[in-house]
Image (spheres, helix red, strand yellow):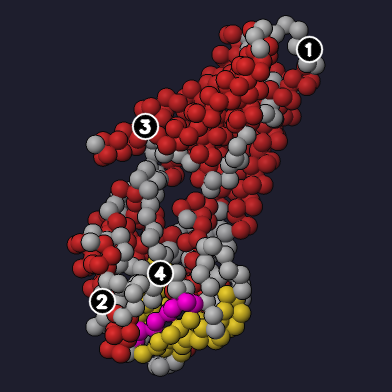
Amino acid sequence: MGLIGVFVVRMRLSAIGYSMSHGAFAGAALGVATATNPLLTGLLFASGTAFLIGPIADKARLHADTITSIVFPLNMALAFVFLTLVPEVGLSSQVANVLWGSIISMTNADLVYLVTLFAATLAIVYFVWKELFAIMFNRKLAEADGINTKPFIYLIIFLAGVVVTFSLKLVGGLLIYALLFNPASTVLQFSENMRKVVVASPLVGMATTVSGLFVSLFFDLPVGSCIVIVSTIVFAVALLLSPKRRRKEENEK
Amino acid sequence: MVRLKTQNTARQSNKTTNEAIIKLEDVSTVYEGARRTAIKNVNLTVKRNELVYVVGPNAAGKTTLLETINGMLPTFKGKASVFGLNVQTHARQVRCEIGYVPQDFMVKPGEPYTALDVVLMGRYGQIGFLHHPSKADKAEALEAMKLIGVETLADRPMGKLSGGQQQKVMLARALAKNPRILLLDEPFSNLDPDSRGQIPTLITKLHQEKGLTTLIVTHDIHHMLDQCSRVVVVSGGRITFDGTPEKALPLVENHPHTTSLEATHH
């Protein structure tokens, strides 16, 4: 997941503009949980998201798409956490699993699928690394050097689709964005070497997943939501500590 | 194998002197979008070892003209061939023979690519699908960097280099594939004063020593005018003049939009 995330982030294939509505959703969920007007809390969250995305994108010098893709699952995760706080919410466990995932429902077969998928992704990336690297740098230049870029873009979109589908059980369909974007975006704060980014992103992904799992067990909250919240916190810390940002600010002074 | 064969044919035919290497016949753009300026009924023949200056005001169609030559223009009317190969049906072979430096290319600070990564990418099209760059490829890339005088920057992150240094790295990238043709789009813009003097000298050296057929697109005729053999003036998507630099100068100087870099930048 973290591996494919590198390419999705670098090629700017990320979706635009889901964050606002889901900010409202998280707010409304908080409203229900705390018995205040859901409309009011929804509005607060949505406008909060809007105010966050622009300035963060500016400050972090990330593409607004990337920020959107990080804020979107964070809002969803918060919404689900708030919803589980409401005792009357009676979602069937199956529905709940699809929405926010459950590591407990993972079977051995699921694990085999995921490991196979990881090996296959690794192999594909190894063999077409040269093309992917050039396209991430600049698609037009890659074309000018004689690389037919279209099949490789389609390959990444296809792989992202497959990886998302197979990871559904773990984090749930609505939170899956976080695992795709957060590790890659976190590592890109630190490294100026694309090869290191590709190696480190899956590792960061694994570490945040395991930490999220422990947080979930400790506080008895949904696993998917905890993974998303932990990986977003890790990204936020990375943003604050990033030597790249600091150097730029110094240059500006 | 296919690539090698085409390259060999291209190189053999290249030996004939005065042979037309680039040939545009009645080329016109079909779709006119915001990103590309239209060109209309352009006829242009460039012979081996020529150094051609393509000048004209902004949005005259100069870049579109270059993009037609390396097959980057997806659809157009008319015929365009390089080494006798149709640029659309043989795009990959044609592009492997052309070193291209685009306009205003700047890598942002913090981007995870070293200068050597960028130069080596110039060879990727030739290496072939499923193959990784070999030691020989890396040596060629370093050789190109040495030729331009940027070999000491090889391990530096691209985004941390100055505009002039990046421009030189991009020139090395274009040379890394050992091209027969060099297409340079506004190579004198974004340069610091030091590089502004060096880049024209470098281009002249490459043209003379490597015998590269060179096309330079610029809005400023004054750089290197004494070195070029021919000036093509593009205006409103059409070629309005094609001749010697001496004859071109009064024409261009009278044009209100074509100014020297000095006038634009100071």
On the image, numbered disc 3 is attached to which residue? A242
Query: Can residue B120 be seen here?
Result: yes
Q: Nearer the viewer, residue B231 or B171?
A: B231
Q: Counting residues from the N terminus, which is met first, the one under dot 1 or under dot 3? A: 1
Subunit under mark 1: A
User: Closer to the camera: disc 4 or disc 1?
Assistant: 4
Q: Label 3 amino acid?
A: Ser
Marks 4 and 1 in Cβ contact (< 8 Å) = no
Q: Where is the N terminus of chain B found, in terms of image quarters?
A: bottom right
Gap between marks 3 and 4, in whole Å?
40 Å
Amino acid type at circle 4 is Asn
Which residue lies at the image location 40% right of the left edge and 87% below the top edge?
B241
In-front residue for pair B67/A41 = A41
Residue B199 placed where, x, y %?
26, 68
The residue under the point 44% across, 64% down is B123
The residue mark sitting in front, 3 or 4, is 4
Chain ID at mark 2: B
Which residue is found at the position 45% from the left and 73% from the top? B60
